[in-house]
Amino acid sequence: MGFFHGGWGENMNGAALIGLAGMLLLVGSWIPQTVETIRTRHCPLNLQFIVIYVTASTLLTLYAYFQRDWIFFALNFLAALQSAINLVVKLTEKKG
């Protein structure tokens, strides 16, 4: 069965499909911002927001790992990754 119960496609029920759709939409919402941030090397997001978001997503990723919830794990891992990219750019962008 592997690490995650249910696996990708194993026992995919209605609740898992709803979770997958939500995950794709939520993670997908970060894509335009992250692409723009990388392209312009400027992150217009509030620094405190990004720090809290990265921290929360990372903690939720760990929680999902221990709960063995693959949808919640993937959602929070990808959200943490994309918001962390924005955070790195925010911390390294030149002022002025």
Image (cartoon, helix red, strand yellow):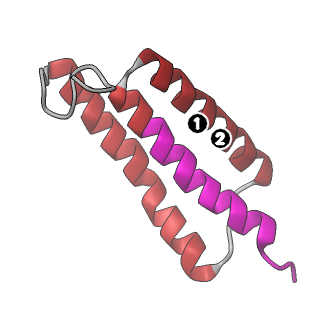
**In the image, residue 44 lies in the stretch drawn in magenta:** no
Main secondary structure found in the magenta portion: helix
Indicate the position of residue 71 as horizontal and vertical percent values.
34, 30
- Viewer-side residue, 85 vs 10: 10
Question: Which is more foreground, mark 1 or mark 2?
Answer: 1
Residue occupying image coordinates x 47% and y 24%: 64
Give the residue type at disc 2. Answer: Tyr
Q: Which mark is residue 57?
A: 1
Q: Which mark is residue 40?
A: none
Direction right: furthest residue: 96
For the residue labelled by badge 2, is the local secondary structure a helix, a strand or a loop? helix
Residue occupying image coordinates x 32% and y 44%: 24
Q: CA distance from mark 1 to mark 2?
A: 6 Å
Residue occupying image coordinates x 61% and y 61%: 85
Give the residue type at disc 1. Answer: Ser
Q: Which residue in the structure is indicated by mark 2?
A: 53
Q: Quadrant of residue 57?
A: top right
